[in-house]
């Protein structure tokens, strides 16, 4: 060859920093990030936002069966939020920020909206499967709030949920509180709720059912005596599991006697807060549960309370146990 061919590298695009993307406002956080890294101009950003808002007229006409393209401001805002929730759902379902940005730039809002609805229908299907598994792992002897959430609330939510015009809304809130309640709204929140509930049930199923029933029953009784809402059932089981693991390393039990708790309190009383943190974390790390990421988050929230209870002689107010006059099932 008489001429030397020069290689001109393809223009490199600055990647999207996915850590800056918010699932609760995915579309708009994606636009902001694209502008920040120079993938979109401010004019591009305004054009996309205008394109989304302009589609509200079509949504309103669909909502009113073609009778009107205008509604009171509050209703229009709700329809717009539902539209954006659908678009968010589709872009998130792509599992790729680059593909999501490309779709947002090139696809019509009609297609984004429709594809988002299909993605949310798949989430509904996921919820049905999760609910089935939650029922299979249901805690025996649980509270009315727990049982009615599983038997009534989730089904009612899915029945009343409206993807097209109320995708961002939650028709009702489950009456049973989890250790970690998911934020946001709509069916995505319910999927996260069921996922967390399944994690909690699965943790409890690592232990003998009669021991778990003992812990739950004692918590219910104590809450009634104190006139307070028992709240979550899995946290007391976890705390008992940690203390049992401290007292009996390698043995997987959750049911403690009053004497066990007194012994634990006595052994731990001389430890400094830092030493208690190390001891309890070591005990937690020996627990047999799967999906430890969720349990680690719960444990991190409970650990300061557990340390405080030990240092102030209040371990018995935090840990469920069988009173001395109760018969404890034999440990195997």
Image (tube, rainbow, N blue to C red):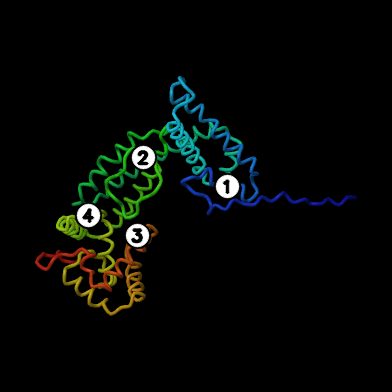
* Apparent side of residue 21 relative to residue 274 in the rendered image (left or right): right
CA distance separating discs 2 and 3:
25 Å
Vertical comparison of 30 with 232: above or below: above
Q: Determine which residue is flagged by label 3.
A: 298
Dot label at residue 230: 4
Is 281 placed left or right of 111 in the picture?
A: left
Q: Secondary structure at mark 4?
A: loop
Q: Which residue is mark 1?
A: 32
Spatial separation of the CA atoms under disc 3 and disc 4: 17 Å
SS for dot 1 = helix
Q: CA distance from mark 1 to mark 4?
A: 43 Å
Quarter of the image containing the C terminus?
Answer: bottom left
| Sooner in the amino-acid sequence: mark 4 or mark 2 | 2
| Residue at (64% x, 44% y) in the render | 40
Work out whether 180 lies above or below 167: below
Rendered location of residue 176, percent (x, y) = 27, 48
Q: Nearer the viewer, mark 3 or mark 4?
A: 4
Label 2 Cα neighbours within 10 Å, binned few <14 / some 14-19 / many ≥20: many
- Relative image position of residue 22 (x, y in whole percent): 49, 49
State the SS at label 2.
Answer: loop
Residue drawn at (83%, 50%), measured in percent from left and top?
5
């Amino acid at each position: 060859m008489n001429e030397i061919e020069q290689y001109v590298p393809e223009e490199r695009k600055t990647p999207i920093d996915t850590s800056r993307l918010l699932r609760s406002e995915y579309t708009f956080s994606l636009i902001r990030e694209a502008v920040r890294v120079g993938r979109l101009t401010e004019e591009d950003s305004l054009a996309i936002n205008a394109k989304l808002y302009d589609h509200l007229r079509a949504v309103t006409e669909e909502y009113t069966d073609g009778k009107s393209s205008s509604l009171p401001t509050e209703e229009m805002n709700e329809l717009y939020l539902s539209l954006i929730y659908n678009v968010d759902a589709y872009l998130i379902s792509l599992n790729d920020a680059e593909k999501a940005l490309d779709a947002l730039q090139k696809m019509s809002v009609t297609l984004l909206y429709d594809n988002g609805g299909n993605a949310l229908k798949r989430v509904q299907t996921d919820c049905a499967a999760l609910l089935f598994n939650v029922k299979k792992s249901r805690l025996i002897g649980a509270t009315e709030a727990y049982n009615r959430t599983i038997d009534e609330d989730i089904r009612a939510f899915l029945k009343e949920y409206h993807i097209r015009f109320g995708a961002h809304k939650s028709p009702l809130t489950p009456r049973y509180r989890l250790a970690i309640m998911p934020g946001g709204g709509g069916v995505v929140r319910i999927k996260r709720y069921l996922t967390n509930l399944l994690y909690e049930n699965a943790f409890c199923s690592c232990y003998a059912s009669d021991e778990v029933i003992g812990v739950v029953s004692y918590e219910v009784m104590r809450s009634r005596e104190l006139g307070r809402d028992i709240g979550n059932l899995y946290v007391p089981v976890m705390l008992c599991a940690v203390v049992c693991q401290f007292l009996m390393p390698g043995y997987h039990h959750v049911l403690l006697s009053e004497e066990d708790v007194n012994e634990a309190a006595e052994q731990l009383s001389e430890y400094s807060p830092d030493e208690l943190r190390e001891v309890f974390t070591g005990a937690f790390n020996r627990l047999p549960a799967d999906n430890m990421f969720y349990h680690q988050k719960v444990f991190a929230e409970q650990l300061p309370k557990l340390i405080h209870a030990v240092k102030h002689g209040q371990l018995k107010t935090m840990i469920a146990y069988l009173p001395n006059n109760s018969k404890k099932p034999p440990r195997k």
